[in-house]
Image (cartoon, rainbow, N blue to C red):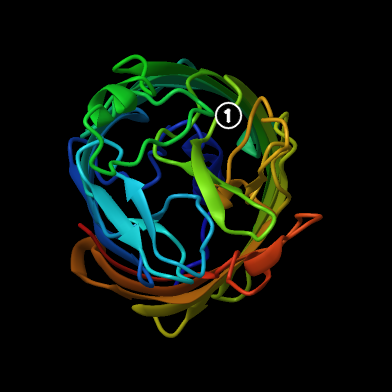
Amino acid sequence: MQLMKPKKIRHALTAATCGLLGVNSSDSLGEEGDWSFDSAVLYYSEVDRVTAVEPVISATRDFGEERALNLKFVFDTLSGASANGATPSDQPQTFTRPSGKGAYTAAAEETPLDDTFRDNRFALSSQWEQPINRDYKTGFGINFSTEYDYSSLSANANLSRDFNKRNTTLNTGLSLAYDTVNPEGNIPFGLSSMVIDNGQANYRSEFNATRGDSEENKDILDLIIGLTQVIDRKTIMQVSYSFSDVSGYLTDPFKIVSVVGDDGRPLEYRYEQRPDGRQKQSLYWQVKHQFETDILDLSYRYFWDDWGITSHTIDLRYRWILDGRHYLEPHIRYYDQSEADFYRRFLIQGESLPDHVSADYRLGNMQALTVGIRYGMALRNEQELSLRLEYYLQSNDNTESVVPGILNDVELYPDVEAIIVQLGFKF
């Protein structure tokens, strides 16, 4: 394999920066007027939980003079069961489905899972890139996605400036998004109590009393600024800062929190309630170095927000070139996160209800490890076939000061395990 040119390495790292805003890189362009395609099928499966299949195809056309158009289509199909937030118990538990039509039951000592999780998502995006002059380059894009109860529309723009004989690049980007959630059964009032159908004549009116509007919206503003520097012929480094402001409906309408008694058994279930605003910030650093043939890719990300969450992410890839046509790329990623200020695994009867609460494990104190490997094979005419296989393990920690009764004998924080398989083809 030939040594990657500094300009091509810079484009690869620029793509990582712009990727936070949905901006694409023209690094994969072929000859002027040609279309190049990048396709993949991703299979993701959690043990006893969610399974997802995601085919993706991206098409890029080179119009010459560094002008390029990228079109991308994504289709997701998801099925399985998702943790609803309730605690396990030593007895079976019955929950009302989000629509209010019917119920589902969790067995004793098992994590309550909502088996209504079924969805398909379509996503389309387009991106245009072109130079303004020798030193400046700009890009614009539009993205749209829709699924059964959620839709999103966003637009982005980015501007880059080259310095130092194009060995230094400053990137800036802006993205605006407008999302709409409209679950079947309407939006539950935060902190209201779940109504269980026990055959009562007024069940439907009681259920409707816990529901508000049929849909809610949220607005998202993302900003990013990054600097990419070619260190030498074999090394390139990037640093970036990103800021995100999200306002509107940020609660998950499908998540609940158990209210337990002194014995730890659930007495009722409350719908979660999150703040209606969130500001997120992150710092990102990445370095790529090419040895004689192999390539090292190392990155670190520090994240913090005004919900009290901080996280650290370390990502390491090493592309081991077997010969001119084949490579192996081992991958390891470690993630560590603190919990949100309003995260509670459960509420205890008699306590005052907080203004905000969620038992969603994704907001809890956790660690996650991803290990895997990718195999790639170069074909004729710059085509490439690749296969990625990874294992994911997530563990949550107990931070509750008091764990009453039977909750000491059940698994409050089960691990989440998943297998990821991806088949890719560039042509």
Does residue 356 appear in this view?
yes
Residue 338 image point, x, y percent: 73, 50
Q: Is residue 372 above or below residue 364?
A: below
- Outermost residue on the bottom side: it is 322
Q: Residue at x 18, y 41 (%)?
A: 34
Give the residue at mark 1.
274
Residue 61 in the figure: left or right of residue 325: left
Binning the other alpha carbons within 10 Å of mark 1 as few (below 14), some (14 to 19) or many (20 upward) gives some
Residue 381 in the figure: left or right of residue 323: left
Disc 1 marks which amino acid? Arg
What is the quadrant of residue 212 in the picture? top left
Residue 106 image point, x, y percent: 37, 62
Residue 174 in the figure: left or right of residue 328: right
191 or 81: nearer the viewer: 191
For the residue labelled by badge 1, is the local secondary structure a helix, a strand or a loop? loop
Residue 222 image point, x, y percent: 55, 23
Does residue 136 appear in this view?
no
Q: Is residue 86 above or below residue 275?
A: below
Residue 363 image point, x, y percent: 61, 46
Quadrant containing the N terminus in the rendered view: bottom left
What is the quadrant of residue 200 in the picture? top left
Quadrant containing the C terminus in the rendered view: bottom left
Q: Residue at x 45, y 18 (%)?
A: 218
111 or 68: nearer the viewer: 111
85 or 417: nearer the viewer: 85
